[in-house]
Amino acid sequence: MASVSTDTPNKQHGQVSKRTVLWTLLGAAALIILARAFGVLPEWLHRIPEGAIPPTAQVLDGIFSFIQNDLGLIYVTRFIAEGPLEFLLDTSANLLEGKRRWPNIGPIPWASVAGVAAVVGYALGGWKLAALGAGTFLWTALIGQWKMAMQTMSVLVVAAPLAFAVGIGLGILAWKYRWVERALKPMLSVLQTLPFFTYLLPAVIFFKVGPTAGAVATIIFAVPPMILMTTLGLKKVSPEVVEAGKMSGCSRWQMLRHVYVPAARTEILVGVNQVIMLCLAMVVLTAFIGMPGLGAKLLAMMGSFKLGRSFEIGVTIVLLAVTLDRMSKAWVVKQPEHFDRGTPWWKRNHLALLALGIFVGFILLAQVFPILSTIGRKQHFSQGKEIDVLIKSFLAMDGIRGVTEWLRWFLNVKVLIPFRNTLLAVPTPAFILCVVAFSYWLGGRRSAIYAAVFFTIVAFSGWWDRSVITLYTVISAVVLSMMIGIPLGVVAARSEKWSNRILLACDTAQTFPSFIYLIPAIMLFGVNDVAVVFSILIFATVPLTRYTIEGLRTVPPEMTEAADMSGASRKQKLMSVQLPLALPTMAVGFNQAIMFAFFMVIIAAFIGTQDLGQELQRTLAGTELGKNFVLGMNVSLMALTFDMAITSWAERRKRALGLA
Amino acid sequence: MKTSVILSVAAISAVVGSTALAEDSSDPIVIPVHNWSSQIVMSNVVGQIFEEMGNHVEYVTTDSQAVYESVRLGDVTLEMEVWEGAFGASFRAALEKGGLHDAGDHNAVTREDWWYPMWTKDACPGLPDWQALNDCAHLFATAETGDKGRYLDGPVDWLKHGKERVEALDMNFTVINAGSAAALWAEIGAAEADKRPVVVFNWTPNFAEAVWPGEFVEFPAWEDGCDKDPAVGPNPTALYDCGNPASGYLKKAAWDGMEGKWPAAYCALQQISFTNPMIAEMAKLVDTDELEPEEAASEWLDANRAVVDPWMAACSG
């Protein structure tokens, strides 16, 4: 992997010692494994004995109840939840779906919303986006999901702006004060890797089950990229712009408002896009704690095995996500419009006026034609039953059956179960040494030290075997998705057209609610590890393909031209020029694939696993906050180990290749 | 739209006016709904009963295990379906911490045990006897289980003791835990296509009865102490050597503060008791007739006024 022609042969001296360290680590691991094999390894070196495991969960339980009751934090959070937050949610719920709350004027007719979406789409990106915006809402209304979709949106229209506000605020603070950044960074890393089950429960306890808890969990999930992008954008503002601001005598606030933030506009808007996408990703998961709407309906439909209706709901969520994604991306690219001095205000704001006109017009029309306001049960075009039959008969086709039966047998008996048993047979210290060696090889000394610390904590958490099983599932899924995702990306990257098609497929696969994959996975493979790996696979392949395409397409044309000129064949060009240069970008995809796999492996508990996810699912009953947190930390620590090693490798590579 | 708002406001004020005697708080009663049809419809039925009595009702979707913590804190007011088997543990844990209480049983029995869809019987005619099932174990074998039969048990947190039973009765089966109810349905649904024999965990009342006719496996009958005293049951040295009780409870649970805040509604909640056929009917309206839950609830109410009216009459004034 490292011996490609573009490799920089520096640090000759360092590499020798690095190799020694690597061999020492692996040698020690091998020694322990051998000792175990010959039965001379003392039991306490194989697994940490029960007695030596600190009562972390109980201590945490104590701390939580202290914070919750003695410190009275619950009163503060409950005040926020039941006061301002609930007020906002009630208002939006009244406007969008007609919940009986102040201001008691909703629901807004669907035709008005669709009309405004069309105008907004037009303003941002022309007719295509207008059609997408109107089409999405038209579909939602015609398929009979308007009310549910609006229940979901009523929470998201509160959660997304709040996440934006919190994110930009913290981002500015982190940029201004070094210590804030230092304090935030580890917290954000943990937040991004913590399984969602871990903060669902605290959200319920501190913020009351219902839309409030749903909104809070969504905000927590969506805020990290906003903070990171804000800080990044502000740091990149060029000194010339800053100078210009200072010369015009800006105050500190004016500097921020009129110089820094506009200059960092692109990064901030990318953050906004991320916030929107992550909010939509949480739609189904937050249904466990009272988020109303599409997610809740989806869970109910899956509980009664109605695949057709679940599928339709999934399509709605994807359409909403794609629409909002494309619109926010168009907003990133679109530069602010400037008008000549003296342009009348109606001309400056003609699109806003048009939107207002359509909005009011449809409200008035809806008084005459109620169908424009709400589409009733007997009027919608849901094809739930037909799609149901279609999916089920597709899954039952002989050809598909034959392939999956074979795959199930082959993967389970020949690959997964032996691999899993091998991992479980490795003594704990040897396992940790191997992980440390991997981190050292990939990320260097710092990563290795973190790996050692993190995995030791996991070992002492008392959930070692389950952690290993979690890791086994993640590794299996990621390896398989590399075998699919990378070749797919390489082929797609050859032409612009195919790149775009595959990228669209990636977007769809990523926003399609992951819960829907679970049922076909079970129907194809039965309740076992193959179904689990398969459901993770779909999710983990997306970033691999996406970043492979991205990496290959951004290889500087000079490089490929140089390769062409020196008479390289297509394969040579790919192997010795394009791939090595794309590798740092692909590493980002690889990293994301691992993070997604860790995310999905927890959801796969709904298929049936024996890993940390299964235990986490059990803690949903709400009586064991401490245990819940310990389990979540284990997942987070393992994910972070890989995250750090890969990131540090990618950064070093980029620097070496002069791409950074 | 505006007319409907005005109309509904008028309707609400009329209802509120007529039952002012009840003195229930005007805060909404929060009713949790989960992800299976009978519970959703039942919650809507109860909500509509409360609304008829002049209360405000709101529904919130929650996880069926996490809900007990919310009832305890008063965030949701009650829970309509507490299954002995599936939620007994969470319910008891919350009961111990305080904040919620048992608001009486439904006049319904619940049964949870090994179950098979009817087509399984064609391959293994000796069913529903458990020994006949054991003799057919090879029919249920899969790639991972080798020559042992595969039994798909409920999620581990439902504590169904499938593994213990297989050991106690020395059965030739491997027990696999599904992760959710949906996983069980997917497994049955996949087997349906080629009529492959399967044996899975299932319960009644449940929508699945209508979709896939089937039977419970008859294990040695439950005797008290089967889970505590090894001497009970056919195997003198093991626990769990008999079937689950064929009649588990189905309870209602209420927040401790409900009685003080909504006395009339609380009184009605205690009166309310659904039977197995009623629950099956509610599930059917949604699962087979494809009604939306609130429509199913009002349709069910219209058809069952004779049952419902006495509950409300007992608590008005």
Image (spheres, rainbow, N blue to C red):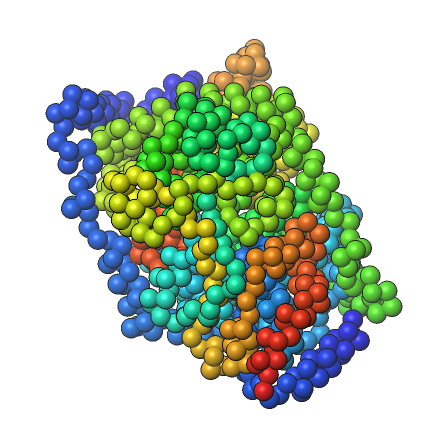
Residue B310 location (% of width, % of height): 62, 76
Residue A369 appears in the rendering? yes
Q: Is residue A197 left or right of residue B297?
A: left
Between A372 and B199, the residue placed more toward the observer is B199
Q: Residue at 46%, 41% (x, y): give it.
A: B218
Query: To which quarter of the image does residue B27 belong?
Result: bottom right
Q: Is residue A364 left or right of residue B85?
A: right
Residue A553 appears in the rendering? no
Between B281 and A220, the residue placed more toward the observer is B281
**Quadrant where the C terminus of chain A is found in the figure:** top left
Residue A296 location (% of width, % of height): 58, 55
Q: Residue at 59%, 75% (x, y): give it.
A: B311
Q: Residue at 80%, 76% (x, y): give it.
A: B3
Query: To which quarter of the image does residue A657 belong?
Result: top left
Q: Is residue B259 left or right of residue A91?
A: left
**Quadrant where the N terminus of chain A is found in the figure:** top left
Residue A534 location (% of width, % of height): 50, 32
Q: Is residue B38 left or right of residue A220?
A: right
Number of callouts: 0
Vertical arrangement, residue B11 with respect to residue A435, above or below? below
Between A53 and A452, the residue placed more toward the observer is A53
Q: Residue furthest bottom?
A: B21
Between A569 and B231, the residue placed more toward the observer is B231
Vertical arrangement, residue A59 with respect to residue B232, above or below? below
Q: Residue at 63%, 69% (x, y): give it.
A: B307
Residue B132 location (% of width, % of height): 46, 31
Q: Residue furthest right?
A: A368
